Image: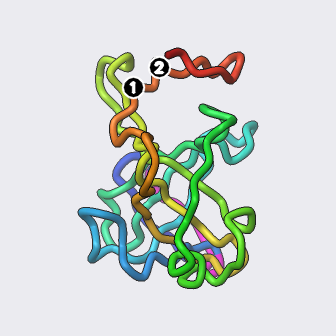
């Protein structure tokens, strides 16, 4: 069992097999390659995770399952991206969008245009920029109706 002393969650125990590898890092943090996904609420599924950097315990990303925000979310990856992740179909992957939290929670945004994409079997991930879509880099969380699952236009 390994341990990491994190900025926000104190001492976290994990196994090497728990780690996610981002060979190219995450945009703006290309030097950080290894992350551990932490479930924020043990009673919930993986709707909201904290991607905690192993190399820099001060860096963590709050990520959300985009399909809980927008059931019609339809990320299309390039054949090169699918190959990089070692899959034949987008359906074999897990998707998360990075949330930028603000003190005023009504200003919190999610990046629907550049999701984190993970192959859960190989424990490898990457951040992609979806082309040919009108998804936003900074979509206000308040624009989603998370209760009914419908978008507010």
* Residue 9 in the figure: left or right of residue 86: left
CA neighbours of label 2 inside 10 A, class few (<14), some (14 to 19), many (20+): some
Is 12 colored magenta in this rendering? yes
| Residue lying at 37% horizontally and 78% vertically, measured from the top left | 24
* Residue 146 in the figure: left or right of residue 133: right
Residue 146 coordinates in the image, percent (x, y): 63, 22
Residue 11 coordinates in the image, percent (x, y): 48, 58
| Residue lying at 53% horizontally and 83% vertically, measured from the top left | 84
| Residue lying at 39% horizontally and 46% vertically, measured from the top left | 8
Q: Main secondary structure of the magenta part?
A: strand
CA neighbours of label 1 inside 10 A, class few (<14), some (14 to 19), many (20+): some
Whether the residues at callouts 1 and 2 have beta carbons within 8 Å, the answer is yes
User: Cα distance, mark 1 to mark 2?
Assistant: 5 Å
Is 2 colored magenta in this rendering? no
Residue 108 coordinates in the image, percent (x, y): 37, 27
* Quadrant into which the N terminus falls: bottom right
Q: Is residue 1 visible to us here?
A: no
Residue that label 1 marks: 140
Please tell me whether residue 119 is drawn above or below residue 60 in the rendered image.
below
Q: In the figure, residue 2 lies in which quadrant?
A: bottom right
Residue 104 coordinates in the image, percent (x, y): 31, 17
Q: Is residue 145 visible to us here?
A: yes
In the foreground, 74 or 115: 74
Please tell me whether residue 41 is drawn above or below residue 24 in the rendered image.
above
Callout count: 2
Residue that label 2 marks: 143
Residue 84: mark? none
Q: Secondary structure at mark 1?
A: strand
* Residue 84 in the figure: left or right of residue 132: right
Magenta stretch bounds? 10-17
Q: In the figure, residue 42 lies in which quadrant?
A: top right
Q: Secondary structure at mark 2?
A: helix
């Amino acid at each position: 069992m390994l341990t990491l002393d994190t900025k926000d969650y104190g001492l976290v125990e994990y196994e090497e097999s728990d780690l996610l590898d981002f060979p190219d890092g995450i945009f703006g943090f290309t030097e950080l390659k290894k992350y551990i996904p932490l479930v924020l609420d043990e009673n919930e599924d993986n709707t909201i995770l904290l991607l905690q950097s192993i190399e820099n315990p001060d860096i963590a990303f709050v990520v959300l399952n985009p399909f809980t925000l927008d059931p019609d979310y339809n990320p299309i990856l390039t054949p090169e991206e699918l190959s990089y992740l070692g899959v034949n179909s987008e359906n074999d992957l897990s998707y998360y969008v990075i949330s930028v939290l603000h003190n005023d929670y009504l200003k919190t945004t999610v990046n629907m245009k550049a999701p984190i994409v993970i192959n859960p079997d190989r424990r490898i991930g990457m951040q992609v920029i979806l082309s040919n879509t009108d998804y936003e880099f900074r979509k206000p969380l308040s624009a989603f109706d998370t209760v009914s699952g419908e978008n507010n236009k």
